[in-house]
Amino acid sequence: MSCQPAILDLLEQYIEIQGGGEQWLTVQEFRRHFGIGRNNTHLVSGILWRIYKNPMFSSSCRVIRIEKIRDPLQPYRTVSRYLVRKEMAAKKRYCHPDEFL
């Protein structure tokens, strides 16, 4: 069973709680907010990376940018932070039959 849909739902919920639009987040902040264990760190970062690299990935959130920053609690360590944007629902476009002529 895949945890991917659950993580995507939590990501969407996190963005809405933080005010929508664009939000910077780290995996550590995301894990702490939802009480996710450390053993799922690679799962969360992998999904965020997949959303960033694959524009066809089906998610209502997009990772726009990834930056490496120093961890404020452990300055010798670098972590990735992700700029996540909640996408508006895509509207279906219906073509009139005369448009093809």
Image (cartoon, rainbow, N blue to C red):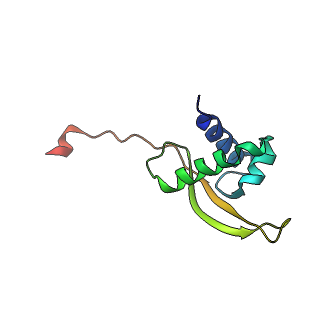
Q: Quadrant of residue 81?
A: bottom right
Q: Position of residue 20 (x, y in %)?
A: 67, 51
What residue is at 71 percent from the left and 46 percent from the top? Answer: 14
Quadrant where the C terminus is found in the figure: top left
Q: Quadrant of the N terminus?
A: top right
Identify the residue at image location x=86%, y=65%: 73
Residue closest to the eye, 19 or 49: 49
Q: Position of residue 17 (x, y in %)?
A: 74, 46
Q: Is residue 42 left or right of residue 28?
A: left
- Where residue 86 sits in the image (x, y, percent)? 59, 50
Left or right relative to 88: residue 6: right
The answer to which quarter of the image holds residue 22 is: bottom right
Q: Nearer the viewer, residue 78 or 95?
A: 78
Residue at position x 46%, y 52% from top? 54
Residue farthest to the right?
73
> Which of the 4 quarters of the picture holds residue 79?
bottom right
- Is 95 on the left-hand or right-hand side of 9? left
Counting the numbered discs, the total is 0
Residue beneath the point at 66% across and 48% down: 42
Above or below: residue 49 compared with residue 37: below
Judge left or right: residue 98 versus residue 19.
left
**Residue 74, horizontal then vertical, whole percent:** 84, 66
Above or below, 99 against 79 in this view is above
Q: Residue furthest top?
A: 1
